[in-house]
Amino acid sequence: MRSTGLRGKARLLVGPHVRRAREAAGLSQAALARRIGISPSYLNQIERNQRPLTLRVLALLRDALGVDLDVVGDDADGRLVMDVQGALADTRAGVAHAAGRDDIRELVRAFPDAARALAHWHRNAVEAQRRIEEMAVGLGADLPHGAPTPVSPYEAVLDFVHDHRNHFADLDERAERLAEDEGLHGLAAEAGLAERLRRRHGVRVALVDRDAGRRRFDAATRRLEIPRRLAPRRRAFQMAVELAFLEHGDALDRLTDTPGLGDADARALARIGLANYFAGAVVLPYGRFLEEAERVGYDIAVLASTFDVGIEAVCHRLSTLQRPGRCGVPFFFVRVDRAGNISKHHSAGELQLSRVGGTCPLWAVFAAFATPGRFVTQVAQMPDGRLHLWVARTVVQPTGGYGSPDVEFALGLGCELHHAHRLVYGRGLPTADPALAVPIGPGCRLCVRAGCRQRAYPLVGRPLDIDEARSPATPYPAM
């Protein structure tokens, strides 16, 4: 039988992903069909999963839409699979059902809208439970009967960013043009942005001695105040954020006008996030940054020194380099505190993190806390067999003078292991032997690994194995 060159026919049935990518690009079926040289009826059958993709059409769609459908078809909805699995296995719903991962993956592929609705319903239920518990330990206030409990704006924005693969092409290109037109390179960035604000918008930048590390814009007096204590690059970043609102409000409005951000608070939060995205792209222009990243093997410390920015800014930018035709390594980026709370997670690739039951303690980001200020590397394997290379390091954000506790996080930057040869961090690692990889999981409640001695909770929706009673997951483990 003739081989397609891909791992199985199901991998090629990615119709809903093609449709969403086409709609995101603003193309009709007829327009996309003309662009790649196939008939509209053939494209319609592909989008309805009535015909699988051939390698030739897959390549044409990838070039036309800027989406790696070869990856998407395999597991780009891995997070949605994880969310549905969590919803079905959540005992709080009273209908826990430990559906097989293959069955859930087929559900997601065949009925993606229904799967998203199920995951959305579950997040609503979890959020409602959280609010009830918070009020129970608070002042005893009652939750109004029948009150809506939408997904938090923060979660909605994370989903929004994930759906765009953490890359917003229009904003990135506008930022790069601005940086080139105004010569915003090196130390010239701060002065150039201040002059642009004055010349184009009559805005005067004032450096002030204020503790808060944020800008303050007075529209009436056209005065933009920025804390003097910030480093020059961070002051430039704050000016670029204000320019995003002043010059590119149309793009921010268009991008946030989506049903996924139906809540006004979510749209406002997404708008701020996109303005920050624009500012980061001004300070670290796409072409120059990607060229330097490739040249130095994605060395985070070298990039931070070269562009005079922080480690976190570099990690942020590396996770956005997915311009069609000129892509960088598709990274995952996370920021975690010592308690395991993930305050940031952006991904140009696919990272499966559970929203139920915390994260995996065997993950490299937690080992970073043991060696503060140093990079930690790890080859890790997820339960589905996928291998990742992780680089992690702690960062400290000073909050004030003596007596004020500093804020500490661990940053994690990861990619699939087959990209390791492009990274300095891949040198000398056991990339050829999967048996040497650290077995990690999405979180204890959804991790299917049997016999893990680090498990904090039994797998939800599955009868307890007697061996698990000997693990730390039981309330009174054996001594």
Image (cartoon, rainbow, N blue to C red):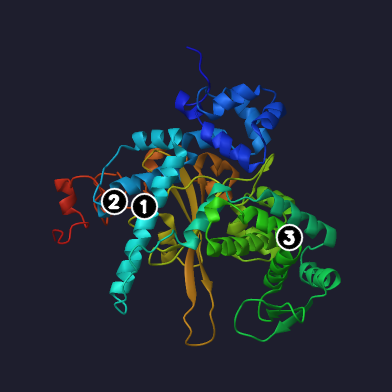
Q: Residue at x 53, y 52 (%)?
A: 260
Q: Which mark is residue 248?
A: 3
Q: How many marks?
A: 3
Q: At label 2, which amino acid type do we have?
A: Asp
Marks 1 and 3 close (CB-CB < 8 Å): no
- Residue 7's x, y, as percent? 47, 26
Question: How far apart are labels 3 and 2 at the CA level?
Answer: 43 Å
Q: Secondary structure at mark 1?
A: helix
Q: Position of residue 79 (x, y in %)?
A: 44, 46
Labels 3 & 2 near each other (Cβ < 8 A): no
Q: Are dots 2 and 1 in contact, CB under 8 Å?
A: yes
Q: Is residue 194 left or right of residue 465?
A: right
Alpha carbon of mark 1 to alpha carbon of mark 3: how far? 36 Å
Which residue has dot 2 on it? 90
Residue 222, above or below 253: below
Q: Amino acid at mark 1?
A: His
Farthest residue, direction top: 1
Which label belongs to residue 469? none
Q: Amino acid at mark 3?
A: His
Which one is earlier in the sequence, the residue at label 1 or at label 3?
Answer: 1
* Element on which disc 2 rests: loop
Q: Is residue 149 visible?
A: yes
Q: Residues within 10 Å of mark 3 (few under 14, many from 20)?
A: some
Looking at the image, tell me whether mark 2 or mark 1 is earlier in sequence order. 2
* Residue that carries the numbered disc 1 in the rendered image: 122
Q: Quadrant of residue 383?
A: top left
Q: Is residue 8 something one can see in this rendering? A: no
Q: Nearer the viewer, mark 2 or mark 1?
A: 1
Mark 3 or 2, nearer chain start: 2
Q: Residue at x 62, y 37 (%)?
A: 22
